[in-house]
Image: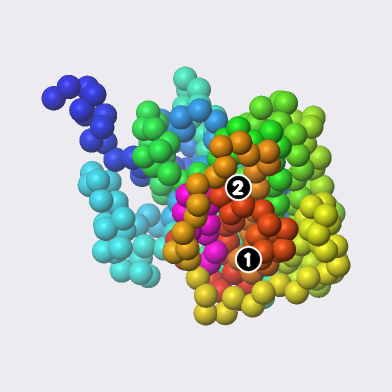
Amino acid sequence: MSAENSTKERPSYALALTRVQGIELVSPSFVRVTFGGPDLDEFGTEGDIFDARIKIIFPPTPQAIPAIDRESDDWWGSFLAIPEEERGSMRTYSVRELHVAEEGTEVVVDFVLHLEPGRTGPASTWASTVQVGQPVFIVGPRRGIPSSEHGGAEYAPGAARSVLLAGDETAAPAIARILEDAPRDLRGAAFIEVPTASDILSIQAPPGIEVTWLPRAAEAEHGSSLIPAVLGYLGGADAAVEVRDLEGEELLWETADYSGLGEPIAAAPASVDRYFWIAGESGVVTTLRRHLVKDLGIDRAQVAFMGYWRRGVAMRG
């Protein structure tokens, strides 16, 4: 078998058994965790990272490792075959940093600490108590496989001369990575809503990108600052907008070439001046989608709308 055929037959995603190598509380709501280990030597992306996503499997107890068949290409089937109480919980996260060096590869992830009663989940609980040395499975893109084959990233501005990025604290790591990977001549704006002013973090954005941090008022709901800021910037309504109730609906996920709602998406114009990337709580994203598309007439093919989570619902996967 030729080396070329062997590469083509490799799974597009790699399953890595990692260990926590570093923990840093970077703000009241963000803890930065560094993962390392020999298995990560297969990890990597082709080119810049942007909003690349990975899966993290949080074990049921700190030192427990689910018995996933690591020799099988069907890691997902092996994971599902494990009794639920033994396999732990899997969640999706953005890569904040990826360090590839001769001495090994490290993956850095920023976790949001949602610890309020009734709002926390297995990921926040794990991140709030994690210790250096604890083992964790991570599933992510395999190095050397074209990004078109493993997906897991949505940021696709094409030839757009400016961008608008918007999201809450769950989207902040992806927005930061996008801006730090972006060409230095990129122009536009980024709006990031966070729980408190102490959660404003440093981002090495291009000089032409205006980054606006939006700390929420005490007890305010998600979107209370983000929605009016984005609409005001675009010349739409700048008053408070009621967030749409999504009870019983799927998370919104719509990009230039995919609609989770099954709606047809026309091809983007040959020349696009501005590209939009909006992520976070699904009700907030859906509300912004309604105003951008219906009220402001923005072409859906120019926007990635991504509901990362939904209020009052414990997300899976």
Residue at screen point 52% across, 38% down: 107
Asked if 195 appears above or below 275 in the picture, the reply is: below
Horizontal placement of 141 versus 286: left or right? left
Mark closest to the chain's N terminus, 2 or 1: 1
Q: Amino acid at mark 2?
A: Gln
Horizontal placement of 222 versus 1: left or right? right
Quarter the C terminus occupies: bottom left
Q: Nearer the viewer, mark 2 or mark 1?
A: 2
Q: Nearer the viewer, residue 54 or 18?
A: 54
Q: Residues within 10 Å of mark 2 (few under 14, many from 20)?
A: many
In magenta stretch: residue 278: no
The percent coordinates of residue 11 (x first, y second) are: 29, 40
Residue at screen point 30% across, 63% down: 80
Residue at screen point 45% across, 33% down: 44
Horizontal placement of 26 versus 300: left or right? right
Q: Quadrant of residue 292?
A: bottom right
Residue at screen point 17% across, 22% down: 2
Q: Nearer the viewer, residue 137 or 304?
A: 304
Question: Disc number at residue 302?
Answer: 2
Distance from Cα at disc 2 to Cα at disc 1: 16 Å
- What segment is highlighted magenta in the picture? 251-260
User: Can the viewer see residue 216 in this picture?
Assistant: no
Question: Disc number at residue 195?
Answer: none
The percent coordinates of residue 138 (x first, y second) are: 43, 47
